[in-house]
Image: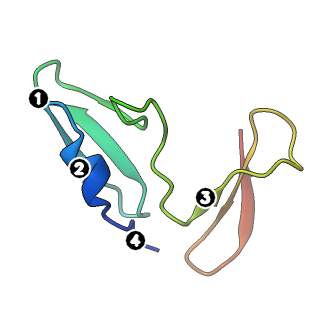
Amino acid sequence: MAADLNLEWICSLPRTWTYGITRGGRVFFINEEAKSTTWLHPVTGEAVVTGHRRQSTDLPTGWEEAYTFEGARYYIK
C-alpha cells in the first residue's frame, strides 16, 4: 500500500525538511540542513500512518501490528 500524501503534513514541514517514501510505502522525513532522516514528523513528533501499519491496544507496549503487500500480518517492536 502506498502512502496517502496528506497536504496538511506536507505544508507543515519546516523550511529545511522534505519527505521520502520507502518501497514499502512508509513515509520518512529528511532534514536537508542536518543531513539526517527520521520516521517521525519534525513538527508533530508522530509517525505518519500509511495504512500498512496500525497500533493496537491489544498488544504489549512498544509493539505494532503491520501487514505485507500480500496481506500477511506481522508484528514490530
Q: CA distance from mark 2 to mark 4?
A: 16 Å
Image point (45%, 29%), residue name = 45
Residue, disc 2: 10
Q: Say which of marks 1 and 2 sits in front.
A: 2
Q: Amino acid at mark 2?
A: Ile
Instruction: Report the amino acid beneath label 3.
Output: Arg
Instruction: Give the CA separation, mark 4 to mark 3.
Output: 12 Å
Q: Residue at x 73, y 60 (%)?
A: 74
Which residue is disc 4 drawn over?
A: 2
Disc 3: which residue: 53
> Marks 1 and 3, how far apart in space?
27 Å
Amino acid on which disc 4 is placed: Ala
Point 11% across, 29% down: residue: 16
13 sits to left or right of 51: left
Which structural element holds mark 2?
helix
Crowd rating for badge 1 (residues with CA inside 10 Å; few <14, some 14–19, many 20+) = few
Label annotation for residue 16 = 1
Question: Considering only order in the chain, which callout, 3 or 1, is on the residue closer to the N terminus?
Answer: 1
